[in-house]
Amino acid sequence: MTGDIRTTAEAVEDAAMPRAHAVHADPSDRGVEDDALPAGVAAKPVGRKSPAEWAYQRLVLYIRKFEQGLDAEHEVAMGFVGGAPGVLRIQGMGYFDPDIVTFYGTDPSGARTQLIQHVSQLNVLLRAMSKPQGRTEPVRIGFRLAADLDAVDETGPVDGDGQAGPGNEAGDEGQRGVDVADATGAPRVSTGRRPDPK
């Protein structure tokens, strides 16, 4: 027995806090595991998140951290294997509760590509990919995705204006994501509500 006396509130708080750990060959390297969670991620306890939401949030943090190490000539992409091995230049990402994560982008030829993945099958290999010829600045989707995480409050996703939108009421389950709208990099944020089938 250590002699520490803990309140019930402290025990509940500790149980709600996610654990993360990493070791690098170079001790000065820092990973996502070493950083505090953004307020928008930490606001909702892990136990109240769907597997898709929690996977999405952590992937966003890994993508942003990966982009921080890229030079001005490269953008984030992901490699994948399976039916059609290749690379997807990540231009958007989203999730659909309770268990689907999706990546939007293009392949090296510029063809529109989307990967839809069940969280139990999720494996992501982040790669640096040269930015397309003619583009002066690389697109940094990780920073846009991370800004979107901060826009999510306890009641659910918010619209692009930062306000809770229709269908964003507490308990409303749906889809969520950020997608690069055009070459300027202006993000499109879904409202988190599936279209009404009327």
Image: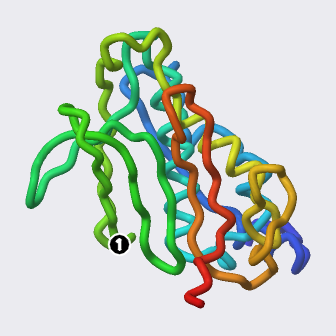
Furthest-front residue in view?
A: 198
Residue 17 drawn at (x, y percent): 70, 63
> Of the residues shown, which amino acid type is indicated by label 1?
His
Give the left or right position of residue 138, taking residue 53 as reference: left
Residue identifier under label 1? 118
Residue 167 image offset from top left, x and y in percent: 75, 77
Q: Describe the element under mark 1 as helix, strand or loop.
A: strand
Within the image, what quadrant is residue 36 found in? top right
Q: Quadrant of the C terminus?
A: bottom right
Disc 1 crowd rating (10 Å Cα; few below 14, some 14-19, many 20+) is some
Residue at horizontal 50 percent and vertical 65 percent from the top: 95
Residue 31 visible somewhere in the drawing: no
Residue sitting nearer the eye, 4 or 153: 153
Query: Which quarter of the rendered picture does the N terminus lie within?
Result: bottom right
How is the rendered protein coloured?
rainbow
Q: Examine the rendered structure and indicate whether residue 79 appears above or below residue 48.
A: above
Q: Is residue 195 above or below residue 186?
A: below
State the image coordinates of residue 82 (x, y, percent, origin top left).
Answer: 11, 58
Q: Nearer the viewer, residue 126 or 140?
A: 140
- Horizontally, is 28 left or right of 130 in the view? right
For the residue pair 88 and 182, the one nearer the viewer reads as 182
**Percent of width and height locating residue 157:** 73, 64
Direction from residue 71 to residue 151 in the image, left or right: right
> At 43% across and 64% down in the image, what residue appears?
101
Q: Based on the displayed image, in which of its 4 quarters is residue 19 positioned?
A: bottom right
The residue located at (76%, 58%) in the rendering is 159
Query: Is residue 45 visible from the viewing direction of this image?
Result: yes
Number of numbered labels in the structure image: 1
